[in-house]
Image: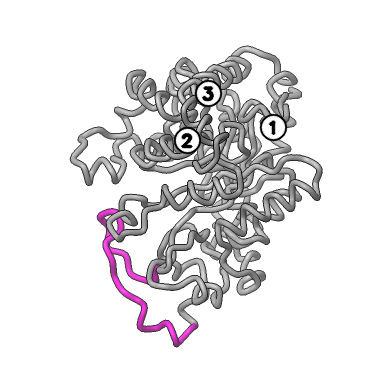
Amino acid sequence: MGTQESNEQRENASGRRALLGAAVLGAGGAVLGLSGAARAAGREPGRGLKSLPVPTIIGHRGASGYRPEHTFGSYQLALDLGADIVEAGDLVPTKDGHLVCRHEPEIGGTTDVAGHPEFADRKKTKVLDGVPTTGWFTEDFTLAELKTLRAVERIPANRPHNTLYDGRWEIPTFEEVLLWQDEQTRKRGRQVWIYPELKHPTYFRTLGLDLEPRVAKLLRKHRKDRWNAPVILQSFEPTSIQRLNKLVDNPLVVLLSGANTRPWDFVETGDPRTVADLITPAGLREIASYAQGIGPTLDLIIPRDASGHLTRPTTLVADAHRVGLVLHPWTMRNENPFLPADFRKGTDADGYGDVFGAYRTYFATGIDGVFTDQPDTGLLARADFVNR
């Protein structure tokens, strides 16, 4: 890693991974067996994941329920509202190799690029993880060009009030986020955590824009590549997490979509397994050999029936805890269309449902945390739950 200290860390990586796994398993035990007050304990400096409160409230793309996602306005508000972690960035590369924070490489829905006539000829159709996608893509822009764009609300039908902030913030780079993290840690007198995601790593690898070494290089530069660093890395592609496991010592999380889906790296390599195979006891043991957690969709915790109502919880929480994995499922949102039918109130696309009831139901399964677009709501729900 460029220094004697870093080399020693790499040589002892497997031992530290084992220790971290034991620490996480201890945290999982707390989730399963201790009182509400004990469960919210955390914030032990230098203890890595064990320093975080449980259930952990993760600001999904910042406070994206109130500000356009993946902007410093959204990230800053998430901290101001009290989020334990900010998911500060979905990482995608530029044409000249910089990492920027966008939900997807296609930026037509999250920026004002369509209003820039100088970029009209950049619009094209590409196949992204097997899906034809039309728009403008970060890999066709230099960083300087992207910096001329401004962010807009991605789902205005659900969040019309967020459109007030369209055009206010530019696209942040991952390095800017790392510097912001340090600045906010100093100002707030507490460690600020971030939770970046590597987006479509196989797709970008075919373009010669490998994500993993770029992420690792920046983390090493800022001395945030260690097991107790306040940076958790995540990806929907297990092989990307395996690559990261060889490059950095950060906590690593495998994201999991619907049970019948296949990670795109599996599709590309001919691996026939689906997410359903990954969440079996054997699949979870394999994940635990190179990662510290999983980020399943909430439907893998409690499935919904055809009408959108919740059914019985699965054994995923207990099975994951048994092998030392934390669970940070996604995504809690206040608006009706995103909630299980059990908790919806009315039919307005931007109307709030009984989100506190939904939180209570999911927290009762023993999850270690949750991604949420409205961190303040999540914190209130946690307070209700641990003090019940």
Pinpoint residue 76: horizontal percent, then vertical percent: 70, 55
Q: Residues within 10 Å of mark 1 (few under 14, many from 20)?
A: many
Question: Which residue is pictured at 36% across the width and 18% down the height?
Answer: 281
Q: State the SS at label 3.
A: helix
Where is mark 3, residue-wise?
Answer: 16
Q: Amino acid at mark 1?
A: Arg
- Tags 3 and 2 touching, CB below 8 Å: no
Viewer-nearest residue: 14 or 308: 14
- Earlier-in-chain disc, 1 versus 2: 2
Question: Which residue is pictured at 68% across the width and 55% down the height?
Answer: 180
129 is within the stretch colored magenta = yes
Viewer-nearest residue: 214 or 319: 214
- Earlier-in-chain disc, 3 versus 2: 3
Q: In the drawing, what numbered circle is on residue 382?
A: 1
Question: Which residue is pictured at 55% across the width and 40% down the height?
Answer: 3
Viewer-nearest residue: 203 or 297: 203
Residue lying farthest to the bottom in this orientation:
117
Give the left or right position of residue 147, taking residue 303 as reference: right
Of marks 1 and 2, the one in the foreground? 2
Marks 3/1: CA distance?
31 Å
Q: Quadrant of the C terminus?
A: top right
Image: magenta residue range: 116-137
Q: Is residue 299 above or below residue 279?
A: below
Pinpoint residue 318: horizontal percent, then vertical percent: 48, 17
Give the left or right position of residue 128, taking residue 54 as reference: left
The answer, for residue 299, to whether it is visible in the render is yes
Where is mark 2, residue-wise?
Answer: 253
Residue lying farthest to the top in this orientation:
33
Marks 3/2: CA distance?
16 Å
